[in-house]
Structure formats: C-alpha cells, structure tokens
Image: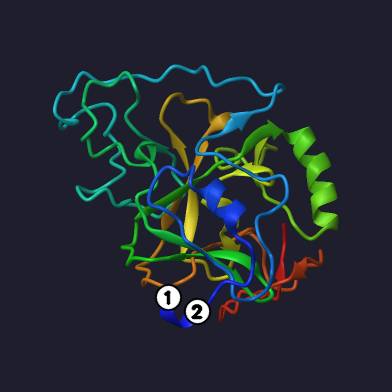
Amino acid sequence: YLKAQGKSKADLSEFHRLLSHTNGPVIPIVNTVDEAGCPDNFTYINQNIYSDEVPRPCTPMFWCECTNGCCDGCECTKERNYDNRGLLLSMGDERIVECGPLCKCGDDCVNRVVQKGRKVALELRRYPHKGWGVVTKQHLKKGTFVAEYVGEVITSDEAENRGFKDKAQGQTYLFDLDQEFVNDICDFSIDAKTHGNISRFFNHSCGPNMRTRSIYVEHRDPRLHRLAIFATRDIKAGEELTIDYSPSAVEGESVKGDPCHCGSSKCRKFMYF
C-alpha cells in the first residue's frame, strides 16, 4: 500500500526531526493530500510532563519479592492483566497495575508491558477532511499495546480554559484523567496540543479499533493515572488506528458537535468533545 501513495507534497523535514525523538520504531510520514507540515509550536515527548500546579504522584506502590518473573499468588498479578505474549486479557474498564520499579521480578516479567514503551510500527499519514492520522504497518492482535497517550498534565480549571479556546478552533487534544471516577469531576487532564507523542494524531471513529485504559506503574494515585491505548480487535496492516473521543455519546445528542468524517457504519454524524 505504501507504493500507491505517491510523493509527499509538503516539506516534512521539521516533522521528521521531531519524530526522530520517539522511543520505539521509526515513524514514517506521508502527505500526498496538501502542503500541511508539522503543527506549530509542537514538541515531541515520550512521557508526561507536569504543569507547576499539578502535584507529583507520591502514593507508594507495593512491590513483590519474586525472581525471574512473578509467581503464582504474587500480589502484583493477583488480577492478571496480560497473557504470556503481553496481550491484554480483558477489554473492560478495570485499572491495570503493572509491576513497579521496586519489584524484584525483573525486566522480563509478563506484567511489564506499557512501561516498556511502544513496540508497534506506525506511520503518520495525511487524510482529506480528517487531517493527520496514524496507520499500523503491521498486523496487530486484539489486546496489543499500541501507545501511551502523553502530554502536559494540567488542572481541570486550566483544561476548561484551554478547551474553550481550542473547541472554538475545532481542535482539542485534552484527555480527562477520569477513568477512575464514575460520577465525580476529575482533578486533572492531559493536554497533547503542544507536547505529545504519536498518540496525539490518532483520529476519532464512532466504531474505533482501540480504546484507552488507566494504568499504574510507579504509584497508585487515582487522580494521576497514565493512559494506555490497546487494540480492541485484530487490526490488519495498513488500517487506520482510531479511538472514540466521546464513547458515552449517542447519535442525535442535543449538544451539537463537529461534523464526523470517520466513515464507520456506526457513525454518529457528529463528534462530541
């Protein structure tokens, strides 16, 4: 499928320079649609950064004394997250707790997946109507860890201020850290507009092939969990990778969103941020 895309029209040199800082396989960039290049004032990062108003996570994690991987009965794997191939076992909403930096189980422990970073080969591609999107260059099994959503962790008040401005421009990269709170308003959000990684460019779909999960590695503070993105079904090489920006939304909501161009048979016609 790569041969059919033709030559990129845009100057992508700055984009290539930024993406060279990625941890994981090199990310090629293709734009045969228009002359759009790198977003203005964008910095590529591999882990979250925190604004001055956000406390640093300090809730201590328990640790295990296992050697050569976690053993049966280990506190870390009491609720098993992954199979022996590192694939996520459950597509539910429950939290994922990986072995932490104090655990004695070693780097090869099956309960260390997200913390090892992205292993999947991806490509950044320009689309008509949708802008930048991401495709996988390899077949992905259901449960594969694809990427972590990273950016600047900010307070909910700051997120509201930024969101109001960004929505007026039809673009927002805010992700509320609310997966541990059912009815309460969350305290913090991740903003990937100016600082982010490849996950910043995942497009919306009303019938997505990935989803986010809350994850803990270094601490257990539910206000400041990390966000991991996993494949929810087998995905063929060349498919676009998508998430649902508003999974609780339903078609025909009274609050009008932005027109949706996802093309899914489940399309709700609008995106609700």
Please tell me which residue is depicted at 21% across the width and 35% down the height of the picture. 108
Instruction: List the residue tagged with mark 1.
Output: 2
Marks 1/2 in contact by CB < 8 Å: the verdict is yes
Expressed as whole percent of the image width and height from the top left, the position of residue 221 reads: 52, 25
Residue 161 located left or right of residue 117: right
213 over 263 or under it: above or below:
above
Secondary structure under tag 1 reads loop
Question: For the residue carrying disc 2, how many other residues have a C-alpha within 10 Å: few (<14), some (14-19), or many (20+)?
Answer: few
Q: Amino acid at mark 2?
A: Gln
Residue 259 located left or right of residue 175: right
226 over 31 or under it: above or below:
above
Q: Quadrant of the C terminus?
A: bottom right
Please tell me which residue is depicted at 34% across the width and 65% down the height of the picture. 138
Residue 154 appears in the picture as rendered: yes
Instruction: List the residue tagged with mark 2.
Output: 5
Q: Amino acid at mark 1?
A: Leu
